[in-house]
Amino acid sequence: MDILQLIKNEPKTIPAYYRQMSQEQLEQKIREIKGVFGNKLFIPGHHYQRDEVIQFADVSGDSLQLAQIAAKNRDAQYIVFCGVHFMAETADILTKDHQTVILPDMRAGCSMADMADIEQTERAWEHLQRLYADSILPLTYVNSTAAIKAFVGKNGGATVTSSNAEKMVKWALSLKERILFLPDQHLGRNTAFKLGIKLEEMAVWDPHEEQLLFEGDDIKKVKVILWKGHCSVHENFTVENISEVRHKEPTMKVIVHPECQHEVVRLADESGSTNYIIKTIEKAEKGSSWAIGTEMNLVNRLIKQHPDKKIISLNPHMCPCLTMNRIDLPHLAWALDAIKNDQPHNVIHIDDDTASKAKLALSRMLERT
C-alpha cells in the first residue's frame, strides 16, 4: 500500500461539535436523517452494541445474520453498520456495487480478528503443508478479516459461525484428514471436542513463534490445528466464576458462548451462539435463574427484557467489549450527517479480488447451512 492510500485510509477524527451535543440533540438528529432517507438508509446493529445505538437499528442480530440481511436489501443506498470492522467488510462483500457500507468509527475493530493477519497465515500454511502435505482444509470463523476469508476461499475452505461450526467442521473433515481453524482456538477446540475429537488429536499453531504446539507423541495423529487466537471478552470467563456461582446460587444455570475456554464450556450447563443464548433465555421458565457468559451489553439487555427471571453476568467484573463500544451516538450522528451532505466517510470497500475469494468461503458455508 502506497503512502497516498495510507493517508486516504487514515481514520477521520470526529469533530468536537458532535461530542458537545446532548443525547437528546443527537437522537433528534439521527431520527431526522433517518426520516429523510427512508429505505435508502439501512442501519444494522450487532447484539453487543450499546442500547443508545441499538435503538436506531433497523434490525439487530449477530454478525453474519446482519450481513445476510444487508445483502438481501436492494433498496438501501447506504448501509451504516453498527458493529466492528470485519462485520462491515462482510457486508461489503455480500452487498451490491451500488450500495455503500459505512462503519461509524473506523477504530471499532476486533482483537480476535486482528490475531490472524494474512502474512502470518500464509507462512503458517507453508509450514503446515510441508508437515502434512495436501491433507488440510482451512476454516475460518466469520470473526476474521476479509483477507483471511479470501485465503480460506482460495484454498477450498469455508467460513463458520458459532451456530453452524459443528456442521462445517464435519463437512471439512469429510473432505480432508485435517483442518486448520482460524482465528479462535476456543471455538475450534470446543466444536471439535463436541464432535468426538480428542484433545490429544488437536494442536495449536503459534503465529508468533511460528511453531506447532502439541503434547502428544505422534504429530501425525493431529486432526485439528487451532490458531492461537481468542476473544478478549469471552476468555475472561473462568472456572472460578462458575465455582462461585455454584456455591452462592446452587440452582442457577450457567450458559456460555463457545468462544469461552474449554474448561468453562465443559462446566457450564449449556453453551451456544449469541442467538442460542438469547433464544434459551426467552424460552426459559418464569422464575428461573441464569448466569450468562457473554458480552455485557447483551447481558444487561437480557436482564431488562426478562424481569421475570434472575439473570446475572457469569463474571461480575466483566465490562462491555471495548471495540464494539466505540460506536456511540456522536459517531452515528456524524456518519449520518456526512451522508446527508453527500460526503460519506469511513466507507468500507474490499477490492474485487479479495471479495471474490472471500465470497467463495462464505458461499460454501451458506450452501450448507
Image (cartoon, rainbow, N blue to C red):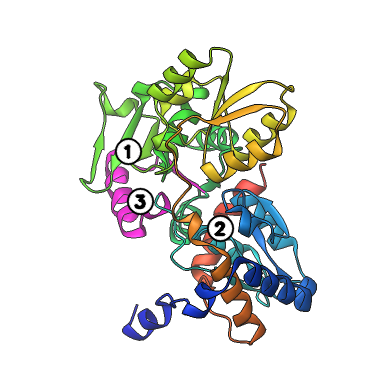
Q: Amino acid at mark 1?
A: Tyr
| Circle 2/circle 3 CB separation < 8 Å | no
Reading the chain from its start, which is encountered first: label 2 or label 1?
2
Looking at the image, which is closer to me, 151 or 213? 213
Reading the chain from its start, which is encountered first: label 2 or label 3?
2
Q: Secondary structure at mark 2?
A: loop
Where residue 33 appears, as percent x and y from the top left, is 71, 76
Reading the chain from its start, which is encountered first: label 3 or label 1?
3
For label 2, count other residues whose C-alpha is less than 10 Å away and answer few (under 14), some (14-19) or many (20+).
Answer: many
Q: Magenta segment, which residues?
A: 112-141
Q: Residue at x 68, y 78 (%)?
A: 98
Where residue 78 appears, as percent x and y from the top left, is 67, 74
| Circle 3/circle 1 CB separation < 8 Å | no
Looking at the image, which is closer to me, 193 or 229? 229
- Residue behind mark 3: 115
Q: Is residue 198 left or right of residue 287?
A: left
User: In the image, is residue 217 above or below residue 298?
Assistant: above
For the residues marked 2 and 3, what is the alpha-carbon distance in whole angstroms? 18 Å
Looking at the image, which is closer to me, 205 or 241? 241
User: In the image, is residue 185 above or below residue 190?
Assistant: below
Tell whether position 131 is magenta.
Answer: yes
- Residue behind mark 2: 83
Q: Is residue 291 left or right of residue 75?
A: left
Quadrant of the image containing the C terminus: top right
Q: Which mark is residue 132?
A: 1
Dividing the picture into quadrants, the one containing residue 167 is top right
Q: Residue at x 58, y 66 (%)?
A: 329
Where residue 65 appears, as percent x and y from the top left, is 66, 50
